[in-house]
Amino acid sequence: MGFKVAVVGATGVVGHEILNILAERNFPVSEVYALASERSAGGEVSFGDKKVLKVQDLDRFDFKGVDIGLFSPGAKVSAVHAPRAAAAGTVVIDNTSQFRMDPDVPLVVSEVNPQAIAQYKKRGIIANPNCSTMQMLVALKPLHDIARIRRVVVATYQSVSGAGREAMDELFSQTRGIYVNDPPKKEHFTKQIAFNVIPHIDVFMDDGSTKEEWKMAVETRKILDPDIAVTATCVRVPVFIGHAEAINVEFERPITESEARAALKAAPGISVVDHRADEGYVTPQESAGEDSVYVSRIRKDPTVPYGLNLWVVADNLRKGAALNAVQIAEILARDYLHASGDDSGTRRRSAG
């Protein structure tokens, strides 16, 4: 027995990762549908090493009978098709920003607040947080449990893949062009991204912050604790895959470096690589293709009574988006849904 799963945005970079991870983790599927725009319909995408799926037109697809929909098509597309899928009985796990702050939609990081998945029944939709928020909260949750976090100051170093395939192409083209003296063409980014950093991700807001910075603050409060203060500076860097974050954390109670290190090592989804020596830390390049959130450079902040500094790195396409969506689906399959072909033929109604 297995589940019928639709992957929406299957031809994008996150959709590609979702299909890979479903196959890698042997998710119990009876059928997988690859959905994308009409322009991509009729093409093919890989599902695992051997199976090829024909891409279907999302606009024409009937979600009736589909158990789980894994969405990563862009917020405007999710706004139309996620409610349509949910109305047909599909539980939607949405990677876009469309539903994250909807009070009736749970915003979930599988290692942080899996209990919130039970709220999916209100709308039939579960939201994935922003990739930069996700990796930060995986690292902060075990520390919050033992010393309670008051305030977070974070600077992000975010790869271009977070902005999609066209952004990756722009970095590649600009880098190649510089070596042959071609002037860089700016199409996706506001300034040259090759050999540069840009302190601007998403649109500017009235207070001078960008929407990416706002997301990190409000999503942290919704997922982890409404009383945590967060201030962020989000920067795009000329890296293809992998986000890094320099995080300063202020706690309500004392916490030592050794206590923090032990809590992080014991937590799910985290790999601690923290040696005070050359190469004793993880960089975005090393995180690419990996499932873990890596924590390095754990050290005391002497400027506040109870403070620590952390360096946190993760593959933004895998853990930052696709893997978390599949992990949520795994919890749904285990605790909340019946597989297709089950004698009852209906989804469980208990909260699990």
Image (tube, rainbow, N blue to C red):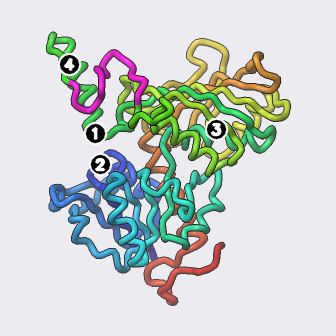
**What residue appears at the point 22 percent right and 30 percent down from the top-left corner?**
187
Q: Residues within 10 Å of mark 2 (few under 14, many from 20)?
A: some
Say the numbered circle drawn on residue 165. 1
Q: CA distance from mark 1 to mark 2?
A: 7 Å
- Compute the Cα span from label 2 to label 4: 25 Å
Instruction: Indicate which disc, 3 or 4, sits on the residue closer to the N terminus.
Output: 3
Number of the label disc, if any, that sits on residue 12: 2
Q: Quadrant of residue 190?
A: top left
Most frequent secondary structure within the magenta stretch:
loop
Q: Earlier in the sequence, mark 1 or mark 2?
A: 2
Q: Which residues are magenta?
A: 186-200
Q: Secondary structure at mark 2?
A: loop
| Foreground residue among 351 and 266 | 351
Are the residues at dot 1 and dot 2 in contact (C-beta closer than 8 Å)?
yes
* Alpha-carbon span between mark 3 and mark 4: 37 Å
Q: Which residue is mark 4?
A: 184
Q: Is residue 255 above or below residue 331?
A: above
Callout 1 amino acid: Arg
* Residue 276 horizontal side relative to residue 133, left or right: right
N-terminal of the pair, mark 2 or mark 3, is 2
| Residue 139, numbered circle | 3
